[in-house]
Image (cartoon, coloured by chain):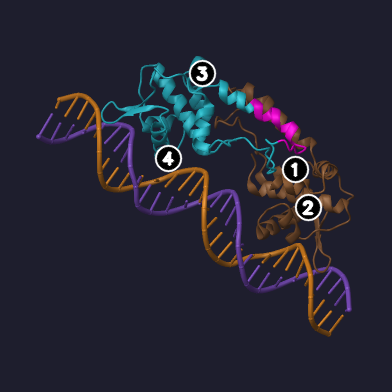
Chain colours: A brown, B cyan, C orange, D purple
Amino acid sequence: MFNKETEYALRGLVYVQIQQMKGFKPGIIEIAKEIDAPLFYTGKIMQRLVKMGFLMSTKGKGGGFYFDLSKPDLPLKAVIKAIEGPKAYSGCGFGLKSCDDDQHCSLHDQYAPIRASIDKLVSENTVQSLASDFNNCDDILLKRLID
Amino acid sequence: MFNKETEYALRGLVYVQIQQMKGFKPGIIEIAKEIDAPLFYTGKIMQRLVKMGFLMSTKGKGGGFYFDLSKPDLPLKAVIKAIEGPKAYSGCGFGLKSCDDDQHCSLHDQYAPIRASIDKLVSENTVQSLASDFNNCDDILLKRLID
DNA sequence: ATATTAAAAGACCAAAAGGTCTTTTAATAT
DNA sequence: ATATTAAAAGACCTTTTGGTCTTTTAATAT
């Protein structure tokens, strides 16, 4: 559905949030291991997320990644759009353009509600809500789901 | 939503069907032009579709692509699965595996109906039904939608 | 101060997707 | 027969995505 970078980013963000709720501030090595993603690639992605302002980090001893708690919850949609661009999961899915225009192709009316559902899903779910869900279920749920 | 090859394949198939309903048997040059896809890439894709048994072709003068009318209608799903593999549009979309298992992530229940809707869409719509729809609307609707 | 730790920066590499072009094969009209 | 036409085959190239690794910078504990 989404590309690898987006997947790793979402998993990484959720993992940081889970750890932060427990009072920890994880580093790249731990994050990559726990979300089952390539070490250096994960590092690169987490750095990009910091640059984009989605989370914060500190260098050196005791350093790692963490969220600014004063900020509002982060919807998945914001992350997806930042990484994949504004047209992620838009388009009618069949290469026929103009599905947003007044011109409708025969797939348009069928796909429109699907796109709306996806939009709702990624708008209503946030990194924080997912972290709470995973955390409530089981300490190692995230890890096991990824295996 | 789907990759370029799938898009061009679907558009090419629908175009061939539209022309066949008019008694024509289009070639690669015409197809590529009308579906607004790269000439040689379109050729390669159409050849693959023939090899996979989705349509037929003849070489030489008066040659081109056409459907075996004795075959049943071709659902979009068959084409999508043949090109993108059986896992196209499956997975919960967030990189969390095991969404089909008894283990559910918190996104699973929300994504399941979306996946089902997509599955319904690509199962019920066929190359033939789309060709009829486009044809009924306007001779050049396909072309214009693609511009 | 300095040694240690961990993120930041960025060069580099591999695989896949997307796309181009030439040569070969087969059909058909003359 | 043969010239012409158009698909088949396949070599090759470009861009994007995914991934690796080294060097630099900054924070902190001693």
- Amino acid type at mark 4: Tyr
Q: Earlier in the sequence, mark 2 or mark 1?
A: 2
- Amino acid type at mark 2: Gly
Disc 2/disc 1 C-alpha distance (Å): 11 Å
- Does A138 appear in magenta? no
Q: Which residue is mark 3?
A: B129
Q: Residues within 10 Å of mark 1 (few under 14, many from 20)?
A: some
> Residue B94 falls in which quadrant of the image?
top right
Evaluate whether residue A144 shows in this view: yes
- Amino acid type at mark 1: Ala
Residue sitting at 55 percent across and 35 percent down? Answer: B86
- Badge 1 marks a residue whose secondary structure is helix
- Return the chain for callout 4: B
Q: Which residue is mark 1?
A: A78
**Magenta region, residue range:** B102-117
Q: Residues within 10 Å of mark 4 (few under 14, many from 20)?
A: some
B144 sits left or right of B94 in the view:
left
A77 sits left or right of A61 in the view:
left
Q: Which residue is mark 2?
A: A53
- Does B109 appear in magenta? yes
Residue sitting at 68 percent across and 59 percent down? Answer: A39
Looking at the rendered structure, whether the residues under marks 2 and 3 are on a common chain is answered as no
Q: Is residue A104 above or below residue A118?
A: above
